[in-house]
């Protein structure tokens, strides 16, 4: 599909809300699929454009390379101070295909190719503790959470008790501070068990049933229909001799391959809920069964929606993500 210059410039332009940049917490199973890294790159580009502010990154994959990878990624984009929280006794402890590779790459002198603040995730705060701390200091209704991995951390947040960060329970904090929860999870309107739900079914079921505010889900079918063109890697990332996202993409699978843009689609919606990119289902309620399959029941009083895309929107989303993920740090 061909876009007019005016339409493309409108879609790619900075679209910060009048109230200021969208304040984001990114909850990710970094390391299981490279689209998590693409999503983080998109967030950094959107922050550079003034459209969002990345408050924290929390990790739902229980692996030692996930947090160091996020740390070097944030440092590459000039934001090494972004706090990171890690899951304890979580899911998928095995090494990912790209996080270990990128974290372990050395310069000829033996120093890390990509400097970072974090080497040992054991020194980092628990994800729930960090979530509580960040939410407590934010204004009411100010935060958007984007969860692109398992529901482990957010289910535990809901179950958390008052602490030094806040006298509120986790559910009370979520109700007061979070304007919207955006997930990459499930398949809609009905579908087979989806990975992010299936890996921690009890947590997903808790999240869908007990989250106090609105949920918008980008299902498997959305990202699976929007594929990144790996042919862009060489040209789009040529500005850097070494780029952690380009290195991660090459390490994840044998090149060339077309990566489905599951997680970046959720990220894009969270910051730019633009009808040129996505449409919303009617309101309703999402439930997950014991095998990790999701169902949607339409209801005028429901607080859940799922994203819908047509061919024109797919093309717009693909181009927006492709441009944002390859923007140089600034």
Image (spheres, helix red, strand yellow):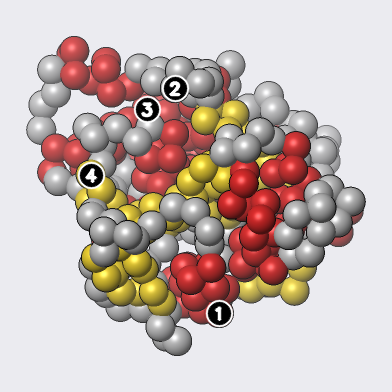
Q: Tell me residue 27's x, y (percent).
A: 59, 52
Q: Quadrant of residue 317?
A: top left
- Locate the N terminus by quadrant: top left
Mark 1–mark 3 Cα distance, whole angstroms, equals: 37 Å
User: In the rendered image, which residue does mark 2 sit on?
Assistant: 17
Q: Determine whether the residue tagged by mark 3 lies in a helix, strand or loop.
A: helix
- Residue neighbourhood size for the residue with mark 1, other residues' Cα within 10 Å, grouped as few (<14), some (14–19), many (≥20): some
Residue 255 visible in rendering: no
Among numbered discs 2 and 1, the one appearing first in the sequence:
2
Instruction: Note whether 244 is above or below 288 in the view shown.
Output: above
Is 67 left, or right, of 206 in this rendering? right
Is 319 left, or right, of 6 in this rendering? right
Q: Tell me residue 110's x, y (percent).
A: 83, 41
CB within 8 Å, label 2 to label 1? no
Mark 1–mark 4 Cα distance, whole angstroms, equals: 29 Å
Among numbered discs 1 and 4, the one appearing first in the sequence:
1
Mark 4–mark 3 Cα distance, whole angstroms, equals: 21 Å
Among numbered discs 4 and 2, the one appearing first in the sequence:
2
């Amino acid at each position: 599909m061909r876009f007019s210059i005016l339409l493309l410039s409108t879609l790619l332009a900075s679209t910060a809300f009048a109230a200021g940049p969208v304040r984001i917490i990114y909850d990710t199973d970094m390391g299981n699929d490279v689209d998590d890294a693409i999503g983080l790159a998109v967030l950094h580009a959107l922050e550079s454009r003034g459209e969002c502010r990345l408050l924290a990154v929390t990790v739902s994959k229980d692996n030692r390379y996930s947090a160091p990878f996020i740390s070097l990624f944030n440092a590459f984009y000039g934001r090494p101070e972004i706090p990171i929280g890690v899951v304890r006794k979580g899911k998928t402890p095995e090494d990912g295909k790209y996080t270990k590779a990128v974290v372990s790459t050395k310069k000829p002198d033996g120093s890390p190719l990509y400097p970072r603040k974090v080497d040992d995730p054991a020194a980092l705060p628990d994800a729930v503790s960090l979530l509580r701390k960040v939410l407590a200091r934010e204004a009411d209704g100010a935060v958007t959470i984007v969860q692109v991995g398992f529901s482990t951390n957010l289910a535990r947040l809901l179950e958390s008790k008052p602490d030094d960060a806040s006298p509120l329970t986790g559910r009370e904090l979520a109700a007061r501070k979070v304007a919207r929860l955006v997930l990459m999870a499930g398949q809609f309107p009905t579908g087979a068990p989806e990975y992010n739900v299936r890996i921690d079914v009890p947590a997903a079921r808790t999240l869908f049933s007990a989250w106090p505010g609105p949920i918008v889900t980008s299902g498997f079918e959305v990202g699976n229909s929007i594929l990144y063109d790996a042919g862009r890697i060489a040209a789009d990332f040529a500005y850097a001799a070494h780029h952690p996202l380009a290195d991660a993409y090459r390490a994840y699978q044998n090149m060339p391959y077309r990566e489905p843009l599951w997680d970046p689609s959720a990220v894009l919606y969270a910051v730019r809920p633009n009808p040129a990119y996505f449409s919303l289902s009617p309101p309703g309620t999402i439930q997950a069964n014991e095998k990790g399959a999701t169902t949607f029941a339409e209801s005028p009083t429901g607080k859940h929606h799922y994203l819908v895309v047509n061919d024109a929107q797919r093309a717009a989303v693909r181009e927006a993500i492709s441009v944002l993920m390859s923007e140089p740090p600034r």
